[in-house]
Image (cartoon, rainbow, N blue to C red):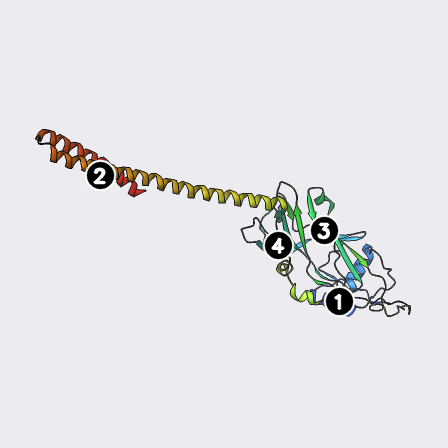
Amino acid sequence: MAEKISLSDTLEEAIEKFKQFGKVDPYPEIEPSLLNSADILDYVAKTGMIYPFDVSCLKPASYGVKLQGEYMYWESLEKPAIEGKLENITEKDIDGDFVFILKKDSIAFVGLEPDFRFPDYIAARFNLKIKHIYQGLLLGTGPIVDPGYQGKIYIPLHNLTNNDYKIKINKTLIWMEFTKLSSNKNWRSSYNKNEDRIGEYIPFDFDKLRVKKNLKGYLADSHNGAILSTMQGLQSQINKNLDDTKDLQKQSQSTLDRFNWLGILSIATLLIGITTFMYNSFIMNNQNVNDYQKMEKHIDSLNKKLDSIIIKVQKK
């Protein structure tokens, strides 16, 4: 009786299984096609391609995956990225579940929970659970996860709504499906290729994995700045323009204030000059003592007013 294969208890056990069956198909009788739940479970148990693995997350032809690990998003063009670990989040919803808040009109990059090790003969695709799609979320999908890929998977989430969206970290977010490739001598020893065929299998490029080991590694060569949604980027640019306009208004007002006080100083200086001239003229041309005293008091009063104006200007 054949030994019954069980799921891996540790990451190290999953890695050892992958070393044995990552390039050798243990189940050649399974036809190349979209794998059903039974085949998914058998391949996971035999090859260690997903760790950790939760049997309760299986559907007829897909597997539910939760979030875990790194996240990163931007709120504006000027501010640095907001990043962290999903398992360190303390925000909770009304149900008491920890939640990642996807801001309105925004894009965030988040990590998936398992470590993936896809055999050379299995590819994968994924998409959001339908409940999230109906609430205005989109997942950046399209390219398949290549056979032979090993490591974490990060996904871009788009919130197209005008409300912040709370994603439960302990609940499945996406459904992943798995497709077995057509037969090839690389993983099926009994495969016979017709002599007139010229095609050769192109394996996964492992050099890419050496430089892209985390979320920053994947984002480093994809942009030169913040990654924002169209609406978020537009709002950020509008806010920047408003701030620039306010700064310009402040500079203009400051310049205007300086010109106003310079004008006052000029007038004050002119009045002082006129007063002095009148004073000197009066002394030279008038001998009436009483009139002289009245004029002197008047000039003193005027000088005091001018001194008060000058003090105010200096304070400015």
Task: Classify residue 192 by image quadrant.
Answer: bottom right
Q: Residue at x 77, y 61 (%)?
A: 44
Q: Are marks 2 and 3 in contact (CB under 8 Å)?
A: no
User: Residue 142, percent across and down?
Assistant: 74, 53
Give yes or no for contact between labels 3 and 4 (Cβ–Cβ under 8 Å): no
Residue with the mark numbered 1: 18
Which numbered disc, 1 or 4, marks the residue closer to the eye? 4
Q: Earlier in the sequence, mark 2 or mark 3?
A: 3
Gap in angstroms between the C-alphas marked 3 and 4: 16 Å
Which residue is denoted by mark 3 in the rendering?
Answer: 174
According to the picture, the residue beneath numbered tag 2 turns out to be: 273
Which x, y percent locates residue 303?
20, 36
Q: Residues within 10 Å of mark 1 (few under 14, many from 20)?
A: many
Where, by quadrant of the figure, is residue 196 drawn? Answer: bottom right
Classify 96 as above or below 268.
below
Q: Residues within 10 Å of mark 4 (few under 14, many from 20)?
A: many
